[in-house]
Image: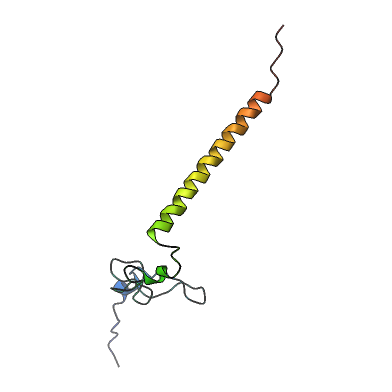
Amino acid sequence: MSAGHTRNTGAMSSSPRCGAGTREGHACRAPAMRGKLRCRMHGGAPASGAPRGNGNAKRHGAFTRERIAERRAIRELLDDADKLLREMASESQRAARPKPCRR
């Protein structure tokens, strides 16, 4: 019989856990890699993730720097147009209000 030796698992159980979700919808219970938010299986390992200069973006070009910048510029232009239309509507409402009568 053993003399009551217990394993010291305190450091492991208190380490931060991976923030990824599993296919079943539960949280991953593996410990995160040092200095990262994910475990070694979910992208915390060195050189994991998409390669530099992602070749997948070259298929359709939707995520190139130029297209992202173009979409951002269009979004800003639409926001400016929306702001102008709102200002014009509020001015026309102010002009349409009847002025109080003064005797």
Image quarter in which the C terminus is found: top right
The foreground one among 19 and 103 is: 103
Q: Is residue 103 above or below residue 55?
A: above
Q: Is residue 79 above or below residue 102?
A: below
Please indicate, yes or no, whether residue 91 appears anywhere in the rendered image. Answer: yes
Q: Position of residue 74 (x, y in %)?
A: 48, 49
The image quadrant of residue 66 is: bottom left
Q: Residue furthest top?
A: 103
The foreground one among 48 and 16 is: 48
Left or right for 89, reference 19: right
Q: Is residue 99 above or below residue 43?
A: above
Image quarter in which the N terminus is found: bottom left
Q: Residue at x 30, y 85 (%)?
A: 4
Q: Residue at x 41, y 53 (%)?
A: 69
Q: Residue at x 52, y 77 (%)?
A: 24
Please indicate, yes or no, whether residue 19 appears anywhere in the rendered image. Answer: no
Left or right for 13, reference 90: left
Q: Position of residue 88 (x, y in %)?
A: 59, 32
Q: Residue at x 35, y 66 (%)?
A: 37
The image quadrant of residue 28 is: bottom left
The image quadrant of residue 97 is: top right
